[in-house]
Amino acid sequence: MAIIGFIGLGIMGRPMAKNLINGGHKLVVYDKFAKFDDLVSLGAEGAASSKEVASKSDIIITMLPNSPHVKEAILGAGGVLEGLKSGSIVIDMSSIAPAVAQEVGAAVMAKNGAFLDAPVSGGEPKAIDGTLAIMVGGDKKTFEKVKPILDKMGSSVVLVGDIGAGNVTKLANQIIVALNIAGLSEAFVLATKAGVNPEAVFDAIKGGLAGSAAMNAKIPMILEGNFKPGFRVELHIKDLQNALDTAHNLSVPIPLTAQIMESFQALRVDGMDTNDHCSLIRHYEKLAKVEVRK
Ligand code: NAD
């Protein structure tokens, strides 16, 4: 069975790696900052660098914050490329700029490796359950080789196009999630200030056309006043910045995304960078001087 390297063991990477171990795979793991004794005690081999991971693996998965981290871990000193075996497959599952996915993919292919960009949606709960939505860019042959492995982390694994298409799809996903949370925020702030119980509003509308996965995931957290991430504000700012840059390079105006970016910037000023992104409602709560709680 192929040995899988896993680099980046944060909120998402750690449970994803655990699902691969529980699925019977031999893993070699590394994180530059976080400890990974828990994975070693489950049977994974710990490594001291991304280079070491690559030298001991046939398939290398990265799950890192953003483009610069992926470039460092794959292209940088002590990185994956230095240890890459000919014929290995690198799968970057981080959400990064599509152009950087293409740049990294070209570098991996120049060293006789194969590359897929395969960002995910669903957040920590779905990473733990192994039910992520995985959107993949790359060639069909490589995709089919690794699909059984991706199936152990996700319940929906879809090839959307060539390298970079995975991250374009993820940017579309992140625009929709941001607009969805902003819409929820305006609506629930209005209902609460009008004197209607927000819990009753949620129960009344979640099964109708306004209902959404974002509503089901975020309104219960908001009602509890639970803003623990989850998905951090700073990561959503990163995704919206990548969306704005990519859109502007293609001459696509995205005015609603730009507006929500500014609301996220206001949260950053209020020190909420590391809170869950459903904290967006706190910006709207501040404007209307009301709190949407149980
Ligand atoms: P995280 O910050 O919790 O984890 C990232 C890990 O990468 C950290 O443990 C960090 O120490 C490690 N790291 C950073 N630079 C490194 C390097 N050069 N070499 C090795 N390790 C390095 O982030 P996360 O929430 O797990 O998110 C990872 C990616 O998944 C991001 O691109 C994010 O946008 C995306 N994502 C997150 C969620 C979510 O709900 N958290 C959902 C979908 C997608």
Image (spheres, helix red, strand yellow):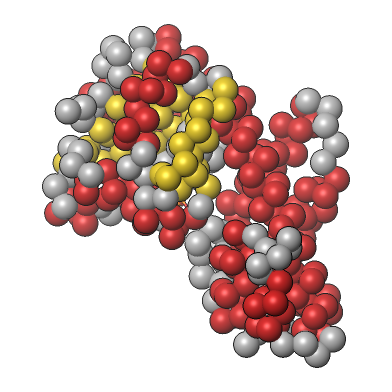
Between 16 and 211, the one lying in front of the other is: 211
| Above or below 257: residue 207 | below
Quadrant in the picture for the N terminus = top left
Q: Where in the figure is residue 237, as x and y percent of width and height?
A: 66, 51
Query: Considering the image in quadrants, where does the C terminus appear?
Result: bottom right
Where is residue 189 drawn, in percent x and y? 78, 77
Please provide percent x and percent y for residue 112.
36, 9
Picture mark count: 0
Q: Residue lying furthest front in this view?
A: 208
222 vs 118, left or right, is: right
Quadrant for residue 41, please give it: bottom left
Is residue 100 visible to the viewer in this orientation of the structure? no
**Residue at x 56%, y 28% (from the top left corner):** 160
Q: Is residue 28 visible?
A: yes
> In this picture, is 251 found above or below 222?
above
Depth order, front residue of 283/171: 171
Which residue is drawn at the image coordinates 40% and 16% (left, top)? Answer: 141
| Image location of residue 101, percent across then percent down | 54, 26
Q: Quadrant of residue 52?
A: top left
In the image, 5 versus 182, the foreground residue is: 182
Please tell me which residue is depicted at 37% across the width and 44% down the height of the picture.
153
Q: Image height check: is 123 above or below 171?
A: below
Q: Residue at x 60, y 39 (%)?
A: 170
Q: In this rendering, would 147 be left or right of 85?
A: right
